[in-house]
């Protein structure tokens, strides 16, 4: 299996060098750049698996870079680094689309653990619809062409809004989404939908796909942020065994 590819973005040359050495020694292919322009060049040459992005940089800071990447539909996972301890920075970073947040000072081992979590999420995420336009998770199959959900080949009733919400969550499986991101992705940036309405739709969808909606397996709450879809491996109909 090839090594995961990382890009470290930090204007501090000493920090870039330290992280590049440590992460390389732990089996990753690591590139480091000093700013957003360097990141753009690096991504154009070769996409990466995870971006490690410093928040406080002169010129275009980490929040602006993160917002710009997400606006361009670049879904590369981002771990935001910051020297600030204010919780608002964490909230802003996550709202802009960052996948995780680590406050300086931190141990390289802690960063290594955060990278591992993100890579495991990516590996557990579906690769998208198959040739027949279907997405599979657990005992379920979501047919995108016919807007139909089945469980072990038995059709499950879904409203149009429930279908769109499920498709959005499944497409971004493994990535925590804020309520604002869910509204944007599922309903459009100009949709007049409140955060509370998103919560209500999540509750309804859990009742449909979760065996125990109070202890969800697929749609999990990310406290202080939103929700994340955890894609369980597909199971064979009527056996309950993973394929």
Image: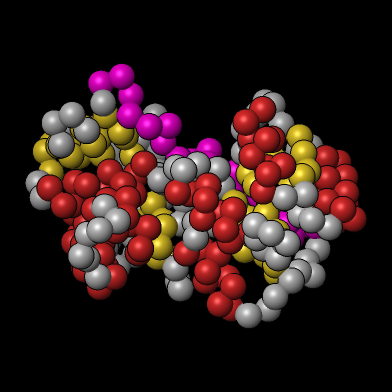
Q: Quadrant of the C terminus?
A: top left
Q: Which quadrant of the structure image shows residue 59?
A: bottom right
Q: Nearer the viewer, residue 89 or 103?
A: 89
Task: Please count the marks in the image.
Answer: 0
Residue at point 28%, 39% (across, down): 139
Q: Quadrant of the N terminus?
A: top right
Residue at point 38%, 32% (across, down): 128
Q: Is residue 208 left or right of residue 83?
A: left
User: Which residue range is magenta in the image?
Assistant: 108-132
Residue at point 21%, 32% (across, down): 143
Above or below, 142 against 223 in this view is: above
Tell me, yes or no, whether the highlighted magenta stretch contains residue 3.
Answer: no
Q: How is the image coloured?
A: secondary structure
Residue 60 visible, this angle: yes
Where is residue 11? Give x, y as percent.
79, 56
Where is residue 28? Give x, y as percent.
76, 38
Q: Which quadrant of the structure image shows residue 176?
A: bottom left
Q: Is residue 33 left or right of residue 76?
A: right
Residue 206 visible, this angle: no
Residue at point 59%, 53% (across, down): 65
Where is residue 106? Give x, y as percent.
78, 66
Tell me, yes or no, whether the highlighted magenta stretch contains residue 131.
Answer: yes
Q: Is residue 73 left or right of residue 237?
A: right
Q: Is residue 181 left or right of residue 39?
A: left
Q: Nearer the viewer, residue 123 or 60?
A: 60
Where is residue 239? Give x, y as percent.
29, 34
Above or below, 111 against 22 in this view is: below
């Amino acid at each position: 299996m090839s090594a995961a590819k990382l890009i470290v973005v930090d204007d501090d040359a000493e920090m870039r060098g330290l992280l590049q050495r440590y992460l390389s020694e732990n089996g990753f292919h690591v590139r480091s750049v000093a700013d957003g322009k360097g990141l753009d060049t690096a991504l154009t040459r070769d996409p990466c698996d995870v971006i490690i992005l410093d928040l406080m940089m002169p010129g275009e800071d980490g929040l602006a870079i993160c917002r710009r990447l997400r606006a361009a539909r670049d879904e590369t996972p981002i771990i935001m680094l910051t020297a600030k301890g204010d919780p608002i920075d964490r909230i802003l970073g996550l709202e802009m689309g960052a996948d995780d947040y680590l406050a300086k000072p931190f141990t390289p081992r802690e960063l290594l653990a955060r990278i591992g979590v993100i890579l495991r999420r990516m590996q557990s995420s579906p690769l998208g619809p198959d040739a027949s336009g279907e997405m599979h998770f657990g005992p379920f199959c979501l047919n995108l062409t016919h807007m139909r959900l089945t469980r072990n080949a038995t059709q499950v009733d879904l409203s149009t809004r429930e279908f769109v919400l499920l498709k959005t969550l499944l497409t971004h499986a493994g990535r925590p989404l804020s309520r604002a991101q869910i509204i944007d992705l599922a309903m459009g940036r100009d949709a007049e939908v409140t955060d509370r309405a998103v919560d209500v739709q999540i509750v309804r969808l859990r009742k449909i796909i979760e065996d125990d909606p109070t202890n969800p397996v697929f749609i999990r709450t990310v406290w202080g942020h939103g929700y994340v879809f955890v894609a369980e491996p597909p199971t064979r109909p009527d056996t309950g065994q993973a394929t």
